[in-house]
Image (cartoon, rainbow, N blue to C red):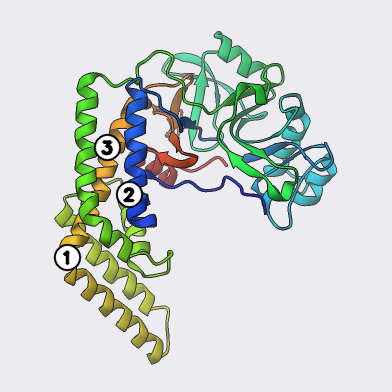
């Protein structure tokens, strides 16, 4: 089975999802990213910008027959949907608009861009570009998902976008001799595709040509102090992070921690003090078990849920200090990450907006970034900004 690039985890989530090793890996990401922004690029580290495109499109040359194909991530499924003709698209996705139309345009135009290998990217536009006035400035815009991207139509970038029939940002390359055993990597280079004419194509690599995202000496000192704080709390929280690993089973401590922290994002609230977060987590756990009680009908099932609840609460109270340290470690990882994101999000070739409706546009920043350290990818996102938009702003796609 081919290994698709499907889901990436947030940096701070790794201690909850992977235990103490996830915490150590998160610290490694932070240190290497800090070195990069200080001008000390080391081996084994790369960064891409997360573009808010949709749908994800996989395209390229089938290594088994040499024919060009397009598809979604379903090209990696057991019953793969690989489209090499317009008839294939109709067969798998119908003949209406939506995904079928997007894939139809992809099959029509992308062969001119990807002439060898297999790439995955986020589709940015097809025939849905607009000319709009934002902040009293005439712009060419496109909104693939949540964020509206805009460019001055008189610039070279604006002219290239205006001329193109399709826009895509490539972020993943696949290699292998069969579609069923492809391996993913993030080292997409400019040699892997062409751009121009009907196709506006970019790679997702983070590029800070202006230098505005560089750490000053003072910035680096503050950042290093934040990492030391995260390391200190992780040393004390590591044992607990390992003890709560359940493999994402329902109503288990690690699973509920993930839901609990996501609730702060959905509500647009910062995580409060460690003590308040600990108290809130206890309430969250009680609420989740109360919901679970409402879904069972037999006394045996109720008793089982009660025993599980009692065991969870007893464990938390018994390990109260370690549980609090786990929350502190999560918060400290998040704090150090945000120092990176705040610097990096100043860099963007396009202007970005959120459509609040009624012609009201609010300036925003890139969705976030992906740090690839030693071949492993981790999301670096301002969750209070973009993840909240994901939960609250209607998506075009």
Query: Percent x, y for residue 252?
Result: 36, 69
Badge number at residue 320: 1
Q: Is residue 241 left or right of residue 70?
A: left
Q: Quadrant of the N terminus?
A: bottom right
- Classify mark 3: residues with Cα within 10 Å, few (<14), some (14-19) or many (20+): many
Question: Residue at 66% of width from left, 26% of height from top?
Answer: 192
Residue named by callout 2: 23
- Of the two numbered discs 1 and 2 on the same chain, state the one appearing first in sequence: 2
Disc 1 versus disc 3: distance between alpha carbons?
25 Å
Quick check: 354 above or below 291? above
Drawn side of residue 43 relative to residue 131, left or right: left
Q: Secondary structure at mark 1?
A: helix
Residue 357 sits in quarter: top left
User: Can you give x and y, in whole percent of width and height, for residue 174 in the image?
Assistant: 65, 39
Residue 382 seen in render: no
Question: Which sits in the foreground, 151 or 78?
Answer: 78
Q: Let me know if residue 350 appears in the view.
A: yes
Cα distance between the residues tagged 1 and 2: 20 Å
Residue carrying label 3: 336
Q: Nearer the viewer, residue 270 or 84?
A: 84
């Amino acid at each position: 089975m081919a290994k698709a690039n499907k889901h990436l985890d947030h940096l701070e989530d790794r201690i909850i999802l992977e235990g103490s090793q996830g915490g150590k890996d998160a610290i490694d990401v932070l240190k290497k990213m800090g070195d990069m922004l200080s001008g000390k690029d080391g081996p084994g580290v790369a960064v891409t910008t997360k573009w808010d495109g949709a749908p994800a499109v996989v395209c390229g040359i089938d290594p088994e027959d040499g024919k060009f194909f397009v598809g979604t991530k379903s090209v990696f499924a057991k019953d793969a949907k690989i489209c090499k003709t317009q008839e294939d698209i109709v067969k798998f996705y119908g003949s209406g608009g939506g995904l079928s139309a997007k894939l139809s345009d992809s099959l029509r135009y992308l062969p001119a861009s990807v002439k060898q290998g297999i790439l995955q990217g986020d589709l940015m536009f097809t025939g849905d570009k607009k000319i709009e006035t934002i902040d009293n400035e005439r712009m060419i815009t496109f909104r693939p998902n949540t964020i509206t991207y805009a460019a001055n139509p008189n610039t070279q970038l604006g002219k290239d976008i205006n001329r193109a029939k399709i826009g895509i940002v490539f972020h993943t390359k696949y290699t292998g001799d069969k579609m069923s055993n492809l391996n993913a990597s993030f080292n997409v280079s400019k040699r892997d595709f062409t751009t121009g004419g009907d196709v506006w194509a970019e790679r997702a690599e983070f590029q800070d040509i202006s230098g505005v995202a560089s750490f000053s000496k003072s910035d680096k000192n503050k950042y290093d102090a934040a990492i030391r704080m995260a390391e200190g709390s992780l040393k004390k929280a590591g044992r607990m992070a390992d003890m709560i690993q359940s493999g994402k089973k329902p109503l288990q401590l690690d699973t509920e921690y993930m839901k609990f922290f996501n609730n702060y994002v959905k509500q647009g609230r910062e995580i409060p003090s460690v003590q308040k977060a600990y108290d809130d987590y206890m309430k969250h756990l009680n609420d989740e078990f109360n919901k679970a009680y409402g879904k069972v009908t037999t006394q045996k099932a109720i008793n089982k849920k009660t025993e599980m609840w009692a065991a969870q609460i007893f464990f938390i109270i018994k390990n109260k200090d370690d549980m609090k340290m786990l929350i502190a470690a999560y918060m400290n990882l998040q704090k150090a990450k945000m120092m990176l994101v705040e610097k990096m999000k100043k860099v963007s070739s396009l202007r970005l907006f959120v459509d609040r409706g009624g012609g009201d546009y609010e300036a925003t920043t890139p969705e976030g970034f992906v740090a690839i350290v030693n071949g492993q990818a981790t999301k670096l996102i301002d969750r209070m900004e973009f993840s909240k938009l994901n939960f609250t702003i209607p998506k075009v796609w």
